[in-house]
Amino acid sequence: MPEKTVATLIPTFIRTNTPQSIELEEKFSRIKENKWTTDTVLHEMGVQLGQLMSILNKQSQASQEEGREFTDISDELCDIALQLIYLTSALSLDLSSISKEEKYIHFDSTNLFDLYPLYGQITEAFLEEEKNRYAKPREGFATRLDFIKDRIVKMYIIIFNYAEEHNIDINTRYKAMCSEATKFVRQQSRKVRFSIMKKIFSPKTPGIGQGDENGNTRYF
């Protein structure tokens, strides 16, 4: 990949896809009635990375789950990118300057196995921030947030480098994934509304002020 390409693509990718991604997160939150937090995002990213690893490590039977098979690497990369966008937004990270930073311009890893250690380092830093682990010095970084930002940027770059190397149009695939996820959310939302309406109008459920089959009146 030309040196400038990935450093230029990532900020554009984030800026273009953040509104739709955040809207999708909000829709999921309404359905589940549970607001997503950074902890939720990290848990979900761990799930997606696990699914990616199961694709990369097909020879191992230990991680295979009966009745489920993951085969599409590009789909898993988009799922991981979605969580990275959530984190980038939640932490108010500005990645617009990475195209000018030498350490990112020349970071050329395409090894997807590198994603998991980077994810682990991000998670560890969050645990330290929440006082759930003893803080460690992060040499070369002024703050813990700077360290987290660096690891997030490297995860983005690996995804984009791999996509370029394997002729994956990450932008197109990402938009398609968001579109499919939005359709899924709408379907689930309709099911939830139908379930609520069914309970309200079910003859087995007496309304307020009405009696049930045993003559008991419901007041609340």
Image: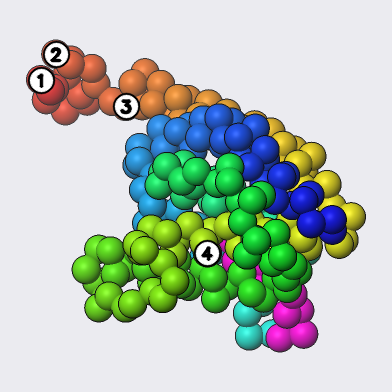
Residue at image location 39% in from the left, 74% down from the top:
138
Q: Secondary structure at mark 1?
A: loop
Name the residue nearer the viewer: 121 or 174.
121
Q: Is residue 154 visible?
A: yes
Residue type of the residue flagged with mark 2: Gly
Residue identified by numbered label 1? 219
| Residue 54 part of the magenta segment | yes
| Image quadrant containing the N terminus | bottom right
Indicate the quadrant where residue 49 lies.
bottom right
Image position, residue 71 (x, y; %): 78, 64
Residue at image location 64% in from the left, 74% down from the top:
114
Indicate the quadrant where residue 129 lies.
bottom left
Of the two numbered discs 1 and 2 on the same chain, state the one appearing first in sequence. Answer: 2
Q: Secondary structure at mark 2?
A: loop
Image position, residue 205 (x, y; %): 28, 25
Of the two numbered discs 3 and 4 on the same chain, state the one appearing first in sequence. Answer: 4
Residue identified by numbered label 4? 151
Q: Is residue 220 left or right of residue 55?
A: left
From mark 2 to mark 4, how far is it between C-alphas?
Answer: 59 Å
- Tell me if label 3 and label 4 are in contact, CB under 8 Å: no
